[in-house]
Image (cartoon, rainbow, N blue to C red):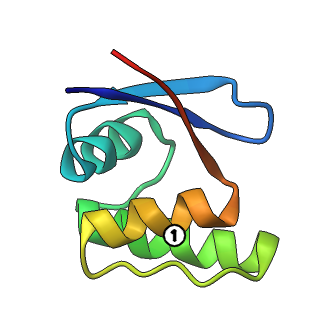
């Protein structure tokens, strides 16, 4: 089952992903980040979230990364499809 995630300050971007790895791949593909890999992308995003919110975002696993983004308020869970 896919889940819709709302991203951004105004929830203006949506990602429909089947699992956390899919979420990271799609988020990275849509970003303007020059990160070469998804792992590097997660680290870059974690640094930005820490600067903006002070929240710590784990980057070792896509599931932890997504959970922490949700906890920080940078990503919200929308309706499931």
| Count of marks overlaid on the render | 1
Q: Local crowd at mark 1 within 10 Å, few (<14), some, or many (≥20)?
A: many
Q: Is residue 17 left or right of residue 71?
A: left
Q: Is residue 34 left or right of residue 38?
A: right
Q: Secondary structure at mark 1?
A: helix
Name the image quarter holding the C terminus.
top left
Foreground pick, 72 / 49:
72
Image coordinates for residue 69, horizontal then vertical, percent? 55, 61
Foreground pick, 37 / 73:
73
Residue position for label 1: 68
Which residue is situated farthest in the top direction here? 81
Image coordinates for residue 51, horizontal then vertical, percent? 76, 78
- Vertical placement of 27 versus 80: above or below? below
Q: Quadrant of residue 52?
A: bottom right
Residue plotted at (24% across, 74% down): 61
Foreground pick, 27 / 78:
78
Residue plotted at (36% across, 46% down): 28
Residue plotted at (56% across, 57% down): 70
Q: Quadrant of residue 35?
A: bottom left
- Vertical placement of 53 versus 67: above or below? below
Residue plotted at (67% across, 66% down): 72
Q: Is residue 1 left or right of residue 14?
A: left
Name the image quarter holding the N terminus.
top left
């Amino acid at each position: 089952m896919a889940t819709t995630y709302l991203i951004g300050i105004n929830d203006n971007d949506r990602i429909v992903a089947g699992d956390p790895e899919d979420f990271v791949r799609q988020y990275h593909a849509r970003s303007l980040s020059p990160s070469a890999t998804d792992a590097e992308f997660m680290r870059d995003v974690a640094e930005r979230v820490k600067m903006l919110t002070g929240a710590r975002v784990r980057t070792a696993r896509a599931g932890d990364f997504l959970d922490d983004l949700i906890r920080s308020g940078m990503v919200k869970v929308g309706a499931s499809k």
